[in-house]
Image: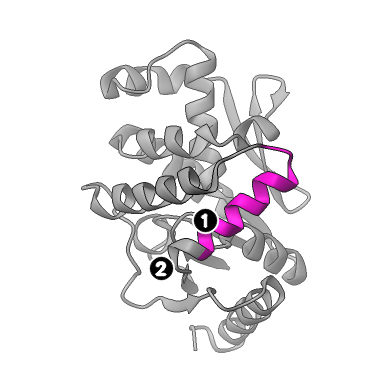
């Protein structure tokens, strides 16, 4: 079973999808981490993220491997498992930049579909419902207003002792929204049959409860309710 969740940066997708997957015994697929991993790997090898042709030529040479272990996505760069290095503030901009390159999206779409064959999954990202899993059993577009998203991301960074400026962070989120929505390749938008879930006024437990309710309803009926 594939549960596909899209939405803008800071909407709470990662936390809500991870907790929902855990409650249901599904695997959690954080596709944003996959884009950050490609960007990090390219930078680590000294490659430029601005030349699309160069990036496409390097993809097959990247020592990246993606898998599902204990219900979660794991990413290896050679023998090194990537984790905290993918959560630094600059990674969002890097991932947004390379996500506009067709070869990168095709490369990661193949990986994402391969991982979905291994288990029931909750996959979250920007084009899960519209491109990667258009036939997903459940499609949800999870969003929140920009100020709420900036505040959540700010608190997330503070909890990890990462210093960020709130005003800069909100500006980055608004710029990321514009870039994601206006790109010609797989723009961020709700699928026509996706369930819209605005989390601006909801706590994380309420969001998880709602997601689990939607998924369980679909699993018994065969279609979203």
Q: Where is 7 relative to 85, above or below?
A: below
Left or right, 141 with reference to 202: left
Q: Mark number for residue 150?
A: 1
Residue at screen point 66% across, 60% down: 15
Question: Magenta-highlighted stretch: main secondary structure?
Answer: helix
Q: Is residue 12 left or right of residue 206?
A: left
Q: Which mark is residue 22?
A: none
* Residue at left offset 64%, top offset 37%: 163
The x and y percentages for residue 49 are 37, 23
Q: Are marks 2 and 1 in contact (CB under 8 Å)?
A: no
Q: The N terminus appears in which quarter of the rendering? A: bottom right
Q: Position of residue 40 (x, y in %)?
A: 53, 25
Quick one: SS at disc 2?
Answer: loop
Q: How did the renderer colour the structure?
A: one colour
Identified at 44% across, 58% down, the residue is 8
The circle drawn on residue 135 is: 2
Relative to 146, is 116 on the left or the right?
right
User: Would you say residue 106 sits in the magenta stretch?
Assistant: no
Residues shaded magenta? 148-162
Give coordinates of residue 92: x percent, y percent.
48, 39
**Cα distance in 3D space between marks 2 and 1:** 32 Å
């Amino acid at each position: 079973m594939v549960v596909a969740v899209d939405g803008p940066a800071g909407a709470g997708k990662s936390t809500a999808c991870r907790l929902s997957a855990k409650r249901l015994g599904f695997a959690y697929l954080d596709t944003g981490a996959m884009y950050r991993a490609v960007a990090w790997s390219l930078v680590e090898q000294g490659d430029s993220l601005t030349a699309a042709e160069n990036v496409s030529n390097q993809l097959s040479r990247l020592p990246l491997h993606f898998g599902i272990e204990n219900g979660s996505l794991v990413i290896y760069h050679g023998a090194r498992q990537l984790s905290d290095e993918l959560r630094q503030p600059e990674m969002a901009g890097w991932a947004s930049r390379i996500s506009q390159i067709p070869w990168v999206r095709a490369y990661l779409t193949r990986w994402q579909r391969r991982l979905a064959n291994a288990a029931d999954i909750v996959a979250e990202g920007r084009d899960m419902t519209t491109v990667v899993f258009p036939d997903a059993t459940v499609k949800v577009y999870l969003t929140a207003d920009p100020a709420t998203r900036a505040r959540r991301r700010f608190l997330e960074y503070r909890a990890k002792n990462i210093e960020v400026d709130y005003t800069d962070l909100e500006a980055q989120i608004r710029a990321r929204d514009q870039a994601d929505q206006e790109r010609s390749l797989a723009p961020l938008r709700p699928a026509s049959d996706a369930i819209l879930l605005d989390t601006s006024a909801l706590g994380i437990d309420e969001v998880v409860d709602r997601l689990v309710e939607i998924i369980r309803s679909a699993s018994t009926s065969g279609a979203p309710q």
